[in-house]
Amino acid sequence: MAKSPVPVSLKQFQEKAEPLKVVINGQEMIAEVKAFSTGSFGWNINGKMTITVDGKPLSVQIGMNMTVVGSKEAARE
């Protein structure tokens, strides 16, 4: 998939983007607005939850990035 130009700058994204609600296995988590060290931007979730398998609780760690495609090349201001 070809990258298309990002219509907002990093500054606009940081000022206007809002956290996103993400549901994993019926449990709500909040993805926070994030500027990544790579220069890209998007949303990030880090956390833990318990998921039951065969009646047994399993503790799982969650790490998820949602990166705006092409954001590394977006304007900074």
Image (tube, rainbow, N blue to C red):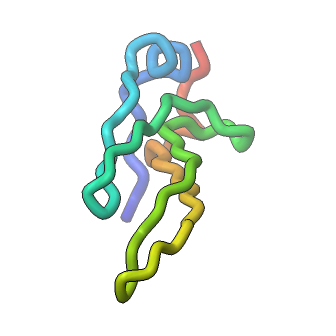
* On screen, residue 70 above or below 57: above
**In the image, residue 42 above or below residue 25:** above
- The structure residue drawn at horizontal position 39% and vertical position 28%, both measured from the top left corner, is 19
Residue 6 % position (x, y): 41, 34
For the residue pair 42 and 52, the one nearer the viewer reads as 52
Give the quarter of the image for residue 30: top left
Give the residue at x 53% y 42%: 44
> The N terminus appears in which quarter of the rendering?
bottom left
62 vs 32: above or below: below
Give me the residue at 48% from left, 39% from top: 43
Using residue 37 as the reference point, say whether residue 64 is left or right of it: left
* Image location of residue 35, percent across then percent down: 61, 31
Name of the residue lying farthest toward the front: 55
Nearer to me, 5 or 47: 47
What's the residue at 35%, 35% (across, down)? 20
Name the image quarter holding the C terminus: top right
Residue 29, position in %: x, y?
39, 43
Q: Looking at this rendering, what residue extends furthest in the bottom direction?
A: 54
22 with respect to 48 (left or right): left
- Comparing 41 with 44, the one in front is 44
Asked if 58 appears above or below 74 in the picture, the reply is below
